[in-house]
Amino acid sequence: MFTIDDGQITSPGGFTAGTAAAGIKYPGKCDLGLLASAVPAVAAGVFTRNAIRSAPVQVSERRVARRNAGAVVVNSGCANACTGERGLRDAESMAAMAAARLGLNDDDVLVASTGVIGTFIPLDRVEAGLGRIALHEANGHSFARAIMTTDTRPKEIAVAVDTPHGRVVIGAAAKGSGMIHPNMGTMLCFVTTDACVDPVFLQAALARSVDKTLNMVSVDGDTSPSDTVFVLANGVAGNELIDEKTGHSFEEALAFVCEHMAKAIAADGEGASKLIEVVVAGARSIADARMAARTVASSPLVKAAIHGADPNWGRIVCAVGRSEAAIDPRRVSLSLNGVPVMSRGMPLPFSETDLRESMKSTTVEVLVELHLGSAAATAWGCDLSAEYVSINASYTT
């Protein structure tokens, strides 16, 4: 597997994209995207576990269950969430408009929205915007920008992977900056591949990949109603069918792409200046390792300390202790940026000045050893800054 230079969601064969400034929330902002496959594609998806679910999530989840799709239409600026029956009709209408634009059946178009909750999507602007979209394989970068809200930069990648039956390409674009605490956050992630993939395997591989990557991100501890991850596999690479028996290298590449997106989303958290990577090792189970890692990554006290480069490691240990993971306080060890600060429940001497200087870097690594088993997990988060409060104190204004 290797990363493709300047890779984008349209790097896999048979995919095109286009965008428009539809004026959904702000005039002049590119806020409407269309992603299309040249041929029918196998589809898989993972969605928010919040009980409040946006209309696009409800519509697309039903359509993904059919295991095929030909396009995705997405907007930023309006989440179309908490909008009742009208919201459902609007999501279906938005997909139908895209289907008419592409000559597809309505059910072959998936829909996603992100932005302010509790506002209705202006369908007249969506329809006009779709009419202005020009699809091209070079438009993947503009698609990644069209889905941004408070993101400061686009998030995209493409990789090539050699399978037992030939080389295939996987591309992706994602957005996410605030209301991030998977399962999942205000996170949209779209993945494309020109591989021929068994639909049952594709859904299982996506779920496994998301569980250990995108579901291990926390920016602020809040879970959005809009979270969506789609994969479209159109098979134009001409490889033999990839399934559970032959799909190891493909799933490994899919997980790599998802991990890249998880890190990018955490690093671009609202107001963030640092990426926090938390590894919990030696846990009794994967579930325990994930609970402990995510609790540390989402702790406001830990995030604030790391923002200030304060080596107040007791906050990390206490977060582990309240995570509900099995621990023995006499066995817990902790390192910050490779500096051991606690071993088997006892503090260690270290240079606070040197560690504080190390913690000023843009990535802070936390390693917790529980010494109870062999399970491990990684979570990603970001520091908590005054800018986060500023952004979210005026989000709708």
Image: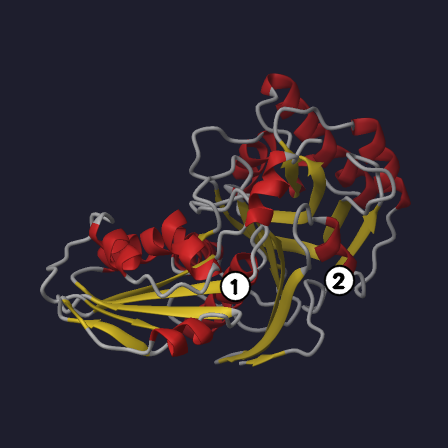
- Residue 187 showing in the rendered view: no
For the point 65% across and 64% down, the residue is 156
Count of picture labels: 2
Quadrant occupied by the C terminus:
top right
Whole-percent x, y for residue 177 in the image: 58, 50
Left or right: residue 18 compared with residue 385: right
Q: Where is residue 290 in the image (x, y as percent from the top left)?
A: 30, 56
Spatial CA distance of label 1 from label 2 is 25 Å
Which residue is at the front of the view, 286 or 196?
A: 286
Residue placed farthest to the front in the image? 353
Residue 369 visible from this viewpoint: yes
Mark 2: which secondary structure?
A: helix
| Residue 141, numbered circle | 2
The residue under label 1 is: 274
Q: In this view, does 265 lie to the left or right of 34?
A: left
Q: Nearer the viewer, residue 27 or 196?
A: 27
